[in-house]
Amino acid sequence: MGNYQISSDVLPTLADFSLPEELGFGEVKVPIMYRADFANGEWQTAELTPYGNIELDPAAKVLHYAQEVFEGLKAYKVGDGRPNFFRPLENLKRMNRSAERMCMIEIPEDIYMDGISLMTAYSEPFIPNGSGKSLYLRPFLIGTRSNLGMGVSDTFTFMVIASPSTIYHAGHMKIQIEREACRAARGGTGAAKTGGNYAAALQSAQNVQRRGYDQSLWLDPVEMKYIEELSGMNFFILQNGELHTPVLNGSFLAGITRDSILALARHQGLTVIERDIPIQEVLTGIQSSAVSEIFACGTAAIVSPVSLIADADGTTYEVQKVDELAATLRQSLLAIQERREADPYLWTAEVDGSYYSEK
Ligand code: COI
């Protein structure tokens, strides 16, 4: 454990809080937050405090040069026992890879684990316990040095906030191919979980939503030919009974759910292939039924079926099967995440009991 203190306002603030009926995704926040600052070359004592605005110098690097990285992971509490995380150190590893790409400080494991564990332990009464629901944890790191020159910050703030949530994008998704814009370039920051990638996706998302679709389907930025990802989710097709997903190429995110789905599918005896997938092959495959099912996955979205792909000219391709293999994989994944079934991969980890001692 690192050095942290718990503000005396935390317990009274939590005592005043109750969960609303409708949760949605990321709308409701538990009224506490964790914060650790890096200054003068070292991590300062962290604090768990009531949730509230943070003060930033208007010249802070994050506001001008987007020096920021974040993560998304979940704490589950479905059965008895303490809440548990799912592959939390994978999120830390990815966060530190993202931080390295953005020239930011490495987050030590004890500070990260303190942040997510304290937030979960103190929020335990507000973790929704229905299957598919969870406490969505959002750790993030920002560069705070206040000078306007282009350069690297030497002061940082690491925080964890948390949202009792249901599934992001529950239901069947209709997606539209983005043929004009790119989300990230090869050699760019596409594989880092940094806000700029999501900002770059907003305009396309807004355009496709105005046309009645849920998400943009991003193509590779070099040839605009191969599938990359949806904004915030990895992409899968079932083709001739085999599961195919775009091979990691540095311009989109290496999803932890993606990796888990690949392991579960292999375990279920499916052939799993990571490769460059031409969009045209998928469209032709839908028409010939060689591609029988499509879905996307992510921490927030879990496994979300795709029922239709629209091309930019409005031509639509209806997928033959919706939420069959996807439902099986989602159930297998949730059963492990929610500790309803054995966890042969050792993916889940209970919140350490010592985080409860000060409550
Ligand atoms: C997640 O799945 O955790 C994400 O960060 C995706 C975000 C668009 C909600």
Image: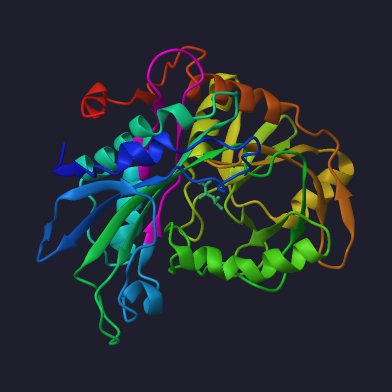
Residue situated in front as seen by the camera: 133 or 10: 10
For residue 272, which quarter of the picture? top right
Q: Relative to 33, is 262 above or below?
A: above
Q: Which quadrant of the figure contains the C terminus?
A: top left
Residue pictured at 54% horizontal, 24% vertical = 129
Residue situated in front as seen by the camera: 170 or 290: 170
Residue situated in front as seen by the camera: 250 or 11: 11
Question: Could you say where residue 177 lies in the image, as x and y percent from the top left?
Answer: 74, 61
Question: Could you say where residue 273 lies in the image, as x and y percent from the top left?
Answer: 58, 38
Q: Which residues are magenta?
A: 69-91
Q: Is residue 134 magenta?
A: no
Q: Is residue 158 left or right of residue 210?
A: left
Residue pictured at 50% horizontal, 28% vertical = 263
Instruction: Tell me, yes or no, if residue 184 can be seen here.
Output: yes
Residue furthest out toward the bottom? 149
Question: Could you say where residue 119 lies in the image, as x and y percent from the top left?
Answer: 35, 38
Question: Could you say where residue 315 lies in the image, as x and y percent from the top left?
Answer: 90, 60
Q: Is residue 21 left or right of residue 208?
A: left
Question: What colour scheme governs how the chains and residues are painted in the rendered image of this protein?
Answer: rainbow
Residue pictured at 82% horizontal, 33% vertical = 321
Q: Is residue 79 magenta?
A: yes
Residue situated in front as seen by the camera: 323 or 211: 211
Q: Which quadrant of the figure contains the N terminus?
A: top left
Q: How many marks?
A: 0
Residue pictured at 79% horizontal, 56% vertical = 213
For residue 53, which quarter of the picture? bottom left
Instruction: Tell me, yes or no, if residue 270 can be seen here.
Output: no
